[in-house]
Image: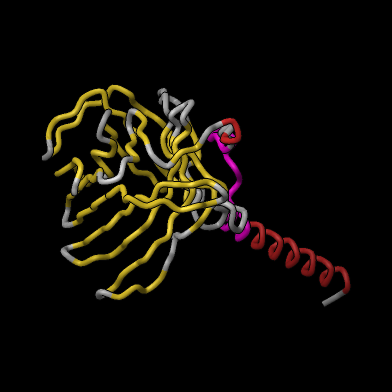
Amino acid sequence: MNQLNRALVTAVMVVAIFAAGCTVIGRLNPPNDSSFQREFGMSECKLVPTGRSPYFILEPGFQTVLEGGGTKLVITVLNETKMVDKVNTRVVEEREWSKGELIEVSRNFFALCEKTQDVFYFGEEVDNYQNGQVVNHSSSWLAGENGAKAGLIMPGQPKVGMKYYQEVAPGTAMDRAEIVNVNDTLKTPAGSFSNCLRIKEGTALDPQEREFKVYSPGIGLVQDANLLLTQYGFIP
């Protein structure tokens, strides 16, 4: 191989390696979509662990149960708080079963802005189960650690077209939402609901991933993908 050919081959190899590297980096750290809000003015809020917004309840003892397709999800507002990133947050537990087998228990941390009624998400501690044993803690994150910041889980005054990050934990959890309807109706085993909020959710870590959630005023989550509300209310 002459000197010119060697130079050409070397150049092609460098370009190929660089391109491959860029592709991998792009997958691990997807470009930020600036149309989704990431800053929420939390410094101007008095953040509290107890209260409610029109579509989100942070009052101890409130519980919702959603079921469908062999899956059961129980969401309970615990009588427990946790300091996360210097904010006293409410602990909301989620327990999920598939075909009767417990597959996940998560402790989620939320705080309410008294002024705006925005509800912010400060992270979650996750236990993933297999055959009755904890196998990992995948998807866990906390605001204030490893570059993570609190996201907006529910606006106090939702409007169609609002787009915002619910989780801001680079490389771990980058869920985001878009409000698509504020006057939806939904029939569930627990009853029929009107004036509902329909939200399209996805993640910047996998832009092809999409699902819909529906929230009813005074109750909260009534549909999560194919799961529908079967029970709700305060428990002892």
Q: Position of residue 141 (x, y in %)?
A: 50, 57
Q: Residue, x 30% and y 45% (percent of image)?
A: 60
* Prevailing SS of the magenta stretch: loop
- Residue visible at 57% across and 49% down? 86
Residue 30 falls inside the magenta stretch: yes
User: Quadrant of the image for the N terminus?
Assistant: bottom right
Please give the name of the residue rendered at 43% of the width and 39% of the height, measured from the top-left corner: 153
Residue 147 visible in the picture: yes
Picture coordinates of residue 83, whole percent (x, y): 50, 52
Which residue occupies the foreground of this view, 211 or 81? 81
Instruction: Decide which of 112, 213 is in the foreground and name it.
Output: 112
Residue ranking furthest to the right: 3
Q: How many marks?
A: 0
Residue 108: image x %, image y %?
40, 52
User: Is residue 47 a member of the stretch shown in magenta?
Assistant: no
Left or right: 32 with respect to 214?
A: right
Instruction: Identify the residue shown where x is 50% and y is 42%.
Output: 151
Residue 74 higher or lower than 20, as above or below: above
Q: Is residue 170 left or right of residue 177?
A: right
- Residues shaded magenta: 23-38
Vertical side of 185 occupied by 153: above or below: below
Quarter assignment of residue 70? bottom left
Residue 207 visible in image:
no
Task: Give residue 232's position: percent from left, percent from top.
Answer: 18, 41
Q: Nearer the viewer, residue 121 or 60?
A: 60
